[in-house]
Amino acid sequence: MKYKDYELTIGLEVHAQLSTRTKIFCSCKNETDAEPNTNVCPICLAHPGTLPIINKHAVELAIRASLALNAKINMRSAFARKHYFYPDLPKGYQITQYKYPLAENGYIDIQDKRIRIKRLHIEEDAGKLIHNKDATYVDYNRAGVPLIEIVSEPDIHSVIDAYRYLKELRLILIYAGVTHGDMEKGEFRCEPNISIRKKGEPLGTRTEIKNLNSLKAVRDSIAYEVERQLKLLENNEKVVSVTLLYNEKSKKTEIMRKKETAADYRYFPEPDLPELILTKDMIEKEKENIQLLPAHVREKYEKFNIDKDFIEVIVEDRKSRQFIENVLKVYNNPKSVVSWILTDMRGYLKQTKQTLSSFNYKDIALLIKLTDSKKITKQHATKALSFITKEHKPIEQLLKEQNLIIQEISSKDKELIKKLLSLESEAVEKYKKGKKGIIGYLIGRVMSETKGKLSPSKVKEIVISLLEED
Amino acid sequence: MIKDYLYYLGQIEKKQLKPEDYLKNILDNIKKYENDVHGYIEIFKSELNVNEANPLSHLYVALKDNILYKGHFQEASSRILENYVSTYSATVVERLIKNGANIIGRTNMDEFAMGSSTEYSRHGPTNHPFEHSLIPGGSSGGSAAVVAYGGANFALGSDTGGSVRQPAALCGVVGYKPTYGVLSRYGLISFASSLDTIGLIAKSVRDIRYVLNFLKGKDKHDSTSIDIDIGKDIIDLKHIRFGIIKEFKGFGDIYIWDKFFKAVEKIGKKAHIEEVSIKDIERTIAIYEIISMSEASSNLARYDGIRYGKSVKAQELKETYMRTRALFGKEVKRRILMGTYALSSENYRDFYEKGVKARSQFIKEINRAFKKVDILLSPTTPYLPFKKGERLKDPLLMYKADTFTSYANLAYIPSITIPLEGIYAGLQLSAAYKNDNLLLEVADEIQRL
Ligand SMILES: [Zn+2]
């Protein structure tokens, strides 16, 4: 932070929708983007006389999330009701966990820092308001979708750490198969709260930001809010406890409402649901269901001595990772495979607006292998991408047909090189007088005359030996 | 010989009574009494049939208006649910129908089951079946009254603090509140979730035991539901230890106590009776009030005029809420307010939390008593049916109707009332948690003495 007398504290409350087939307390489909109010029933509309029944799979996914976040799981936890009136909340209360959450005291590591997680609990999502110019409508497809809420300890003191924490948290949950994690769809949501204090003074007033649907928005909005609060403090003005809305266009936060008094949610234990009692078997089963986490992927590729930036791409992009893993099964040279796919091939795909899925990993493995063994040049390997998907022929045959394979230098080629050098006497003279750099020109002549079929390094060898001979 | 459902069923089986004559008899009773009693809100006459050969054929069940019956109006006597039509049936109703029972109609009640006299109803009061100027008790007053005058041979009510036993006692019929969870609450409009049970009303204990077998047991729609066994053990009263609850003695009407001790004398000839002291049981009514009102304030939050039921539209959302929820009756509003107060963060420790602690303390006390005795005895109500309107201005007096009954709800235990001879009051028997079978066997024996 630029004002070094101040300390920033960021608290992050994350909600992740669990990727269950059905909702948390009824058998409606967990499919929020269906036609409005098509995935609803008496239970999730809170009709009289209905009762909640806990979805076992939601509990399993929440256990899995807790394990992936190194949290201590409570074998007994309990549900509670949180009351407030809003049209998207059918029962007039949300069923959540309050005093007895599913899990506590977890952590995740971001680079060199450990961010502690205070608690993780299960709760239900609310519906959604749709504002029209004439009226406001409510869509209850989302009402009763299972959520986990993950609350961080006040360990985050910079915007970049907040960003890294969220990014890593999201990846872990996606890897564990707990959530689809699409922020645009609201499957992974974050509400940061921000407070700044003069070092040594008690915690400052917190403000909260809502309506953030990308990691970038989270980062930018916090940065904006930090500046706003610092300015106030520098001018001896008070920070007021407010909820802010982030406007992605103007990149500014706007005050949504003042928190005059703390809302009284009148929590009390949910009498319609028994305590949630877990068994060791349930937990063991979820341990087995966590097969891969981002940290495992990092560890694996770090061993291959691969560039950190490449590793992060592999960790974050599941499609690239799977493709690379497949290629490695055929051709196990991680360094060149990763770098060719993530630079040369990626560039080509971007340019031609294609995706990895249009390629067969076996073809790509062979292309990289041929490049590594100097049978084709890197440029020709990229060029090959334009035709290898179009024809169903063995790739080597295709490369030959296109004259892209580098040929061994024959005596005939040697004669040709000799003849070329004799035509370039001026350049040869310059070389002999010590202008060694001109060799590049000579090699270029040979390459263009032979249409790139010869290996440039071999050509160089021969040219030098011929020049040194005389 | 009590002319109960099983008696007529026997006659039908022996071809001494035609099923259609049996139904006609019931409908005639309705014709004769209903105008003066006003126990029903609606009668589903055209839906009744007499021919099915199922275990519960010829059972004509009156449903309290807070137990859902698909495709029928369901209002819990509240203006806020005016013209609401149920989209599904309660589990108990499903089980009744599956076994061939007929639903004969829906009965009047105190709004959302909050009351002890069936006067707090948007349909007006129900009268005592035989003394029309008096109240029938409540909140299941309609159900108790129609069984009493023969307008149904069975009824379902709900018992949160005594709402089945108390009107059953005042109308002179049998009313049973099972162990919490024995009858699924799915489809019962919630009042206080941790206390609510569906209760059964009939002429005899044996009718109740017979029908209970078809309704009881775990339900996948209610995670608080449980299984119990109801067998037919032959019980000799001389092995049963009865305990009269000492702390209740002397509270309430002396005529009731007089008849109560006459009944006790009769039992005493067959069985061992002692006096048993249960610490603070006379004060459980306070715990009951705190817990029931707190839960009620939460359960009734869903009636906001947004998705169903009556809605009073306004420009502002808050205004819509306020005007819609103003449709609740006075007593319901009173309880929502008190419950909201008890749950507020400021008062939670002093009220709700204290109530919950006192409840678990009380359960320990009552379990201690059940080590000494098998059945607890007391009158069902401290008072006889009183004049309509008499207590509307004094809610605290009205709440006292639950003094002898609400402890069973707090302790989740089964409890039943059977009529005391010559008076509109009942003898209440309670047993330990899940001892419903014993309770029903003993009550059956006593009813036949
Ligand atoms: Zn649903």
Image (tube, coloured by chain):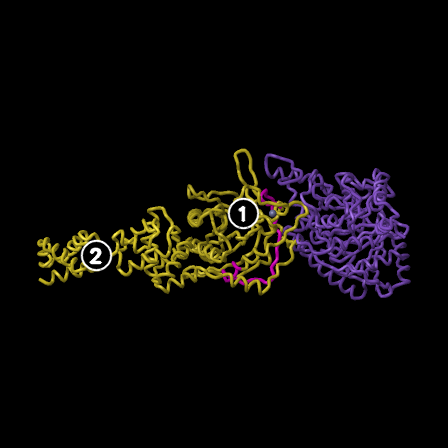
Chain colours: A yellow, B purple
Q: Residues within 10 Å of mark 2 (few under 14, many from 20)?
A: many
Q: Which mark is residue A265?
A: none
Residue B437 location (% of width, % of height): 79, 60
Contact flag, marks 2 and 1 (Cβ < 8 Å): no
Can you identify the residue that label 1 sits on? A31
Q: Is residue A300 magenta?
A: no
In the image, is B153 to the left or to the right of B160? Answer: right
- Whether A81 is drawn above or below B28: the answer is below
Q: Which mark is residue A454?
A: 2
Residue A276 location (% of width, % of height): 61, 59
Label 1 residue SS = loop
Q: Which residues are magenta?
A: A64-90
**What whole-number distance in Å separates the C-alpha atoms at marks 2 and 1?**
58 Å
Does label 1 lie on the same chain as label 2?
A: yes
Q: Quadrant of residue B275?
A: bottom right
Q: Is residue A71 magenta?
A: yes
Q: Which marked residue is nearer to the observer: mark 2 or mark 1?
A: 2
Residue B330 location (% of width, % of height): 73, 41
Q: Amino acid at mark 1?
A: Glu
Dot 2 or dot 1, earlier in sequence = 1
Q: Residues within 10 Å of mark 1 (few under 14, many from 20)?
A: some
Q: Amino acid at mark 2?
A: Leu
Going by the picture, which residue comes out furthest to the top? A134
- Looking at the image, which is closer to me, B72 or A251? B72
Residue B408 location (% of width, % of height): 76, 56
- Looking at the image, which is closer to me, B371 or B36? B36
